[in-house]
């Protein structure tokens, strides 16, 4: 740092919880190191209730968050236009805030900002949350000073590209609630077998439909004894709640939950998509899972899920092969065997990187200091 000026960082994330949460955690960790940071994220209609709640929480912790409204567009010209707008916005920010480092957390919104930073010789760090690198990060890798990865398998596949294993930052309070606290938050009974159903920050209609069809096949005893926490996304809340009520199943159904530590604390097994943040949180909580990866978006969730299955932390079902009967069979097998649940939970926990935020922060500070020593300060 020249003349004792504080380092400055710009963090850019896509608009899902899986991208935004790590960025917010790192921003808070950077502040503890005296780094001034801003978080830009794509504000999407489908995830806005969750991201608004997350950013309010971050702002109370003095993290500066700036949403970038993103209108839906399926055509290439529209995306190029938005990239041009982000490029110009980044250039204005570099003039007024004089960043030493830009950190991309994945998604196409990172691309124009990272490229604008590289033109100005500002330090660039990419964080890759998934086992297989996403399209944007693969394309940007040649311009990055460092690539921070969440899994050893990703680092091994980079063939010498400058990478560091940091893990994926999760909220500190994940894994710190008791089962009684979780039950109280969700209005459930702490001693009953509990399924946690997660479709990601946008929900998952296929998963919602699969669950309602599965409970229709449960025995009367299972319907009386099992209970569910089901985060359905913004579209299916009323339909799913009504289906559970019709079958006499005790269920806490919500579009999303910010206090995820409560849901994890109460659960015995998760039925979930296989986003990287979900995997990291399951690992923190040593929670066994039945994973039904999202089959699109480059199928990166499939690689995440297969890694979990390979270490013994979960069971993988492809969406095309996931039937209500097959899912019910897997749930019955895991819930009936406490020893199996403990073993799967222990294997899942082996994927945890408990100091991920500090590791990633250290990498960002290292790159920022190296770049700051060669750039004039405004």
Image (tube, grey):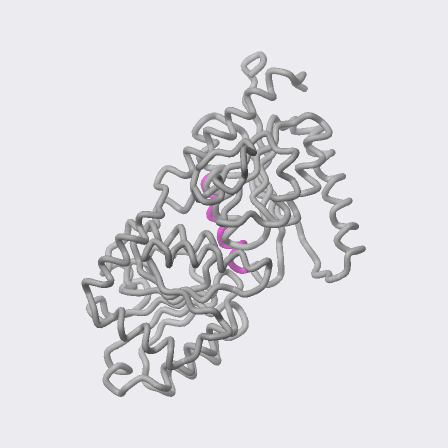
108 lies above or below 207? above
Q: Residue at x 69, y 29 (%)?
A: 96
Residue 90 on the magenta span: no
Q: Quadrant of residue 358?
A: top left
279 lies above or below 3? below
Q: Quadrant of residue 180?
A: bottom left
Of residue 94 and residue 96, the one placed in the foreground of this image is 94
Prevailing secondary structure class for the magenta stretch in the rendered image: helix
Of residue 105 and residue 143, the one placed in the foreground of this image is 143
**Residue 311, percent across and down?**
34, 53
| 354 relative position to 21: left or right | left
Q: Residue at x 48, y 56 (%)?
A: 303
| 189 relative position to 217: left or right | left
- Image: magenta residue range: 49-61
**Residue 229, percent across and down?**
36, 69
| 173 relative position to 143: left or right | left
Residue 59 on the magenta span: yes
Q: Residue at x 41, y 46 (%)?
A: 170
Q: Quadrant of residue 250?
A: bottom left
Residue 38 appears in the rendering = no
123 lies above or below 318? above
Residue 233 appears in the rendering = yes
263 lies above or below 284? below
| 143 relative position to 317: left or right | right
């Amino acid at each position: 740092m020249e003349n004792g000026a504080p380092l400055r960082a710009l963090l850019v994330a896509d608009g899902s919880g899986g991208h935004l949460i790590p960025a917010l955690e790192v921003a808070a960790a950077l502040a503890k190191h005296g780094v001034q940071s801003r978080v830009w994220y794509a504000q999407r209609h489908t995830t806005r209730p969750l991201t608004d709640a997350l950013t309010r929480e971050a702002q109370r912790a003095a993290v500066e968050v700036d949403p970038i409204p993103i209108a839906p567009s399926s055509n290439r010209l529209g995306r190029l236009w938005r990239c041009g707008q982000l490029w110009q916005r980044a250039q204005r920010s570099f003039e007024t805030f004089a960043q030493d480092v830009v950190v991309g957390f994945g998604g196409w919104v990172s691309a124009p900002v990272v490229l604008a930073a590289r033109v100005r010789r500002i330090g660039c760090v990419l964080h890759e949350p998934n086992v297989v690198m996403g399209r944007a990060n693969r394309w940007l890798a040649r311009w990055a000073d460092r690539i921070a990865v969440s899994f050893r398998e990703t680092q091994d596949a980079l063939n010498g590209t400058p990478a560091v294993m940091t893990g994926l930052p999760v909220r500190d309070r994940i894994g710190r609630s008791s089962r009684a606290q979780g039950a109280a938050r969700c209005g459930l009974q702490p001693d009953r077998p509990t399924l946690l159903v997660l479709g990601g920050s946008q929900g998952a209609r296929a998963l919602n439909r699969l669950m309602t069809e599965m409970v229709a096949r449960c025995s009367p005893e299972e319907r009386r004894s099992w209970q569910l926490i089901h985060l359905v996304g913004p579209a299916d809340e009323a339909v799913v709640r009504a289906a559970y009520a019709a079958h006499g199943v005790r269920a806490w159904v919500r579009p999303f939950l910010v206090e995820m530590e409560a849901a994890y604390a109460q659960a015995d097994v998760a039925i979930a998509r296989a986003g990287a943040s979900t995997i990291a949180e399951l690992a923190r909580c040593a929670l066994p899972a039945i994973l039904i990866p999202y089959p699109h978006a480059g199928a990166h969730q499939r690689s995440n899920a297969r890694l979990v299955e390979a270490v013994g932390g979960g069971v993988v079902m492809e969406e095309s092969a996931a039937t209500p009967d097959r899912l019910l069979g897997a749930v019955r097998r895991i819930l009936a065997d406490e020893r199996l649940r403990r073993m799967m939970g222990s294997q899942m926990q082996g994927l945890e990187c408990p100091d991920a935020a500090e590791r990633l922060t250290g990498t960002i500070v290292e790159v920022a200091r190296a770049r700051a020593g060669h750039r004039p300060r405004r």
